[in-house]
Image: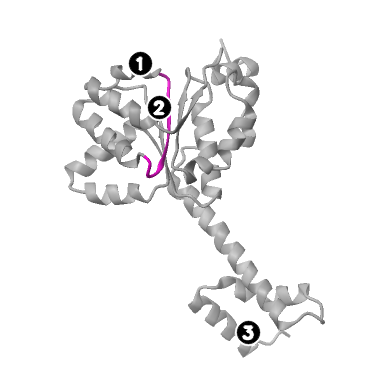
Amino acid sequence: MNTIRPSKELIKLYAKQLRIPCFCDYENVIRQLSPEDSYDKFLCELMKQELLSRADASQKRRIKTAKFPVTKTLDEFDYSRLEHISQAYIQELAACDFIKTRQNIVMIGNPGAGKTHLSIGLGMKACFNGYNVKFCTAVNLANELAEAAQFHRMSKLEKALSKVELLIIDELSYLTFNRYQSEMLFQVISERSERASVIITTNLEFSSWTDLFENEIMVAALIDRVTFRSHILNMNVKESYRLEQTLMTGNTK
């Protein structure tokens, strides 16, 4: 019959109050050590487990907070489809030095080129490296800004965005923006210039961005800020990845 040891229960209680749950697992740590190991080593192993556990929890929290629409990794990406960019270059970006140096990435390519997949993959890498990330479509960001302004929550949203070290704006191409939406998007991107990084994916060449926004002067200023100290990725491909997959699986009629 197992007896409850008061010391064990106290350790669990203290660990809970001090928010160091891994210390409850101290018996497993003891089993992994040899009789010759010192108390110092025992304590170091316990602290190491706690640090690893906290790092894992923080990583999961950053990924959840980023609000990626789906989970995509760079390992899953088919680099053979890229005609103008090497895998080595993408892997270099995956080191996240561009975030450290506050640089931007603009991915330009036709639909189905894998821009969203690649942006999520880089965003995931940023989360793994300890950076705060936010993923959104351009339309959703414009709507979020408009709603915040309407309900007097703009300062709260601006404060939240200021803590984001990598802002991913996907699909800057499908819908046009009115003057009010354009001004708010411009403000967000402008305030991040040389302060924090942005990844933008779009189907349109820079010369066609005037189709999205009413104010041509603002478009010129926006492109100037987005492209300054940036990585411009030409992701045009011959055939859509989604169409290619559909043809391979024989789902076409």
Q: Residue at x 34, y 47 (%)?
A: 161
Tell me which corner region of the image, top left, top right, bottom left or bottom right, holds residue 90.
top right
Q: Does the magenta stretch include residue 203?
A: yes
Circles 3, 2 touching at the beta carbon (< 8 Å): no
Q: Separation of disc 1 and disc 3 at Cα?
A: 69 Å
Tell me which corner region of the image, top left, top right, bottom left or bottom right, holds residue 144.
top left
Circle 1 sits on which residue? 207
Whole-percent x, y for residue 188 in the image: 30, 39
Q: Nearer the viewer, mark 1 or mark 3?
A: 1
Q: What is the three-letter code of the residue carrying label 2?
A: Glu
Q: Which of marks 3 and 2 is in front?
A: 2
Q: What element carries label 1?
A: helix
Q: What is the three-letter code of the residue carrying label 1?
A: Ser
Pointer 1 or 3: first along the chain: 3
Circles 1, 3 touching at the beta carbon (< 8 Å): no
Circle 3 sits on which residue? 8
Whole-percent x, y for residue 120 in the image: 51, 36
Circle 2 sits on which residue? 171
